[in-house]
Amino acid sequence: MNSERKMPLNWKILVLLLAMSFLMTASVIAQDVAVGQATATVQTPLTVTATAALAFGTIFQGVPVSIAETNASAGIFTMTGQAGSGISLYLQLPEYMSTATGDDRMVISFSTTDCAIDTSANTDPTTFGNGWVNQNPFNLPTGVIIGGASTQTALFLGGQVLPSVDQTAGAYTADVILTVAYNGT
Amino acid sequence: MKKKNRVLIGDNSRNSLWGFFIILTLLAAPLSQLAAGVLVAPSVIVLQDKSKTGRMNLQNPSNSPKEVSISFSYGIPESDSLGNVNIFLRDTGITDPHSALGWVKAFPRKLIIPPHGSQVVRFIAKPPKGIADGEYWVRVVVESQEGTTSIPSASDAEQITTQLNMIMRTAIMLKYRTGELVASLELKETIVKVNETSVDVIVDLINNGNVSYVGLLECRLLDADKKIVSKNHIQLAVYKDLKRRVTLPLVEGNFKRPYSVAVSITNKGRKDIPSNEMVFGNDLAYFVGLNE
């Protein structure tokens, strides 16, 4: 004699539905977690790069040398970050360059049109893309943004050195400092 | 008969070509980073009164070591009458009671990051006792330059050579928060200027809260049927009073006059700042008619 009692079909269906419902709920919970993880905020870091130094080449006593901001020897800074974000730029420029020993110095000057800011992907000063040209490096334009398409903005800097007729021969150095800050955070 | 040598590009060849391009890209990537500066993240550092500590990550993606120094300045977005915004960094003579200059320290303050290396800089706040609830601000200035600077030598005894050291500074906002925080923005005035090819909307705002109001300002130029002629938005950070200008192009099309401008300000929807670091406040939304 078979002592096992068979479960009615209705009960079987009910148990099956309950099990399916439990599994579906578990699945929905799992999906919730997955969605939560997917919405994490990724912040774009701000990076300032000195791509090229302003290069005057070899200079001779008494012969001034000028480099335009559209010249291949212009100084180049590039800023990358959050596309379309507003940034404030500030340049600190030297008034003279000095020898390593400090025994002589040479005048360096920047005119009110020695700077250009390019918000396209371009980092070549000779092929300006889009932005501000002939800008005053001592008073940079407001409203500069990190390029929308390229997430990059470039600053080109020209200048002039004025060696005296009795300028000591040798190597002269100076610092050019660019400060960048997001103005929307 | 001359036999034509045709090269059939099968699946294997295609895979080989793709493989070649991938390897080329991987090899080219470091070359593009030869002159890269130091990566500074996050773009805003928030310190809470409970822990009083925070951190910042610096990364050197270049092939040369980078000398980095950390300093502090005070500077918040300030505007002129035309809505142009600038940040002026100051080290002395600061009268703003919300300045945290002088009581936030960084460790380390001078470091050399090796090529492709990274470094964590930690911050600790030691605020004066009994400061009011709200937010206190200071800029973290990260200065970097090449680790080794070579001064060029003149080839001729009579020649002069020059070397300009290009120094990069990134000024990141650090906010110290304590007590009950309130973000509240008030509209003072909206000026709309119609130009030949564009419309300038200058929004004058007052921060009535005790934290900076960080959000988005969106303007939409609408025609008589509320059809969008053009739209533009900017990121907004109001610390005190601030004027911001949004320029809307006057595009040609089948639009009915008169035009109006829909202005919307909210501090929801900023994707560059984690929501747990946002202090949410009121929204502003209104319309301004154009006098053409």
Image (spheres, coloured by chain):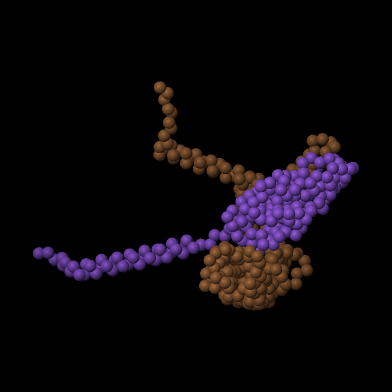
Q: Position of residue A72 (x, y in %)?
A: 70, 44
| Quarter of the C terminus of chain B within the rendering | bottom right
Q: Which chain is purple?
A: A
In-image side of B189 versus A31 (left or right): right
Would you say residue B291 is visible in this rendering? yes
Total marks placed:
0
Q: Is residue B290 above or below residue B123?
A: below
In-image side of A69 versus A26 (left or right): right
Q: Is residue A131 above or below residue B271?
A: above
Question: In this view of the protein, which residue sits in the foreground, B226 or A155?
Answer: B226
* Chain B representation colour: brown
Q: Residue furthest right?
A: A166
Q: Position of residue A184 (x, y in %)?
A: 63, 65
**Splitting the image into 4 quarters, where does residue A172 fall?**
top right
Q: Is residue A112 above or below residue A170?
A: below
Residue at position x 86%, y 46% from top?
Answer: A104
| Quarter of the N terminus of chain B within the rendering | top left
Q: Position of residue B126 (x, y in %)?
A: 68, 68
Q: Position of residue B96 (x, y in %)?
A: 72, 72
Residue at position x 61%, y 49% from top?
Answer: B61
Q: Residue furthest top?
A: B1
Residue at position x 45%, y 38% from top?
Answer: B16
